[in-house]
Amino acid sequence: MKNITDKNLVFIGFMGAGKTTVGQLVAKKLNREFIDIDEGIEKEFHLSVSQIFKEYGEAAFREREKRLIAELSKQKNLVLSPGGGAFLQEEVRNACLSSCLVIYLDISFANWKDRVSLLMDTRPILQNKTFKEMEELYNSRQAMYANHHIKINIDDKAPEEIANLIIEKLPLK
């Protein structure tokens, strides 16, 4: 295994792009700790993300998300998977881009639509949305995802293949 930087790796991309699945594979291959930001917040609140949104609101969730990512981005050798909306916050983008390697998992809307049935129950932001509204949300986030260090198109690729592509693109020390 070639030596890579000890910077944290942060996976960004639209919900359901595979940040957690691919992030776990990359972490295992690089012998790093994997942290799913949403899971950490769920453990803290003892509620699912959907329940947190309902009981406390999206603003409370985003505030905790921002603080947790800011804390973790100062550490080293982690693989972080924030939710698809985390990069909406300027503080999160700045913290990750300045001290971590940000990896964008780029999925086309056509391929993402094939996954939507798997996401509906666990993604509060998708509840009661039409496909047109989902596409508008997808399109509205594309500019935010343009802020990254490495971009991987994941359409029609298996998680293992994506993880290997990422590791090949990681910079040497």
Image (cartoon, rainbow, N blue to C red):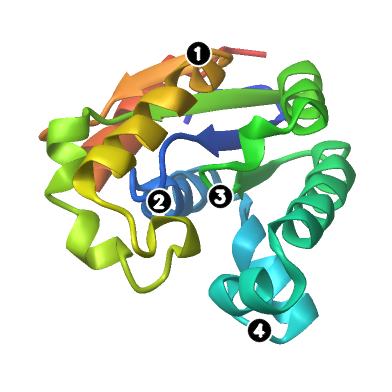
Q: Secondary structure at mark 2?
A: helix
Q: Is residue 114 left or right of residue 72?
A: left
- Check contact, mark 4 vs mark 1: CB within 8 A: no
Q: Is residue 51 above or below residue 109?
A: below
Category of crowding for the residue at label 2, using alpha-carbon neighbours closer than 10 angstroms: few (below 14), some (14–19), many (at least 20): some
Q: Quadrant of the C terminus?
A: top right
Name the residue type under label 2.
Leu
The reply to whether dot 4 and dot 3 touch (C-beta < 8 Å) is no
Please report whichever mark, 3 or 2, sits nearer to the chain's N-terminal start. Answer: 2
Q: Amino acid at mark 1?
A: Ala
Residue that mark 4 sits on:
47
Label 3 close to label 1 by CB (< 8 Å): no
* Residue 155 visible to an observer of this rendering: no
From the viewer's perspective, is 104 left or right of 121? Answer: right
Pointer 4 or 3: first along the chain: 4
Relative to the observer, which residue lies in front, 172 or 103? 103
Between circles 4 and 2, the one closer to the viewer is: 4
Q: Is residue 164 something that shows in the picture?
A: yes
What is the spatial separation of the Cα atoms under label 4 and label 2, in whole angstroms? 26 Å
Amino acid at circle 4: Leu
Question: Of the residues shown, which amino acid type is indicated by label 3?
Answer: Gly
The one of 132 and 37 positioned closer to us in this rendering: 132
Mark closer to the chain start, 4 or 2: 2
Q: What residue does disc 2 label? A: 25
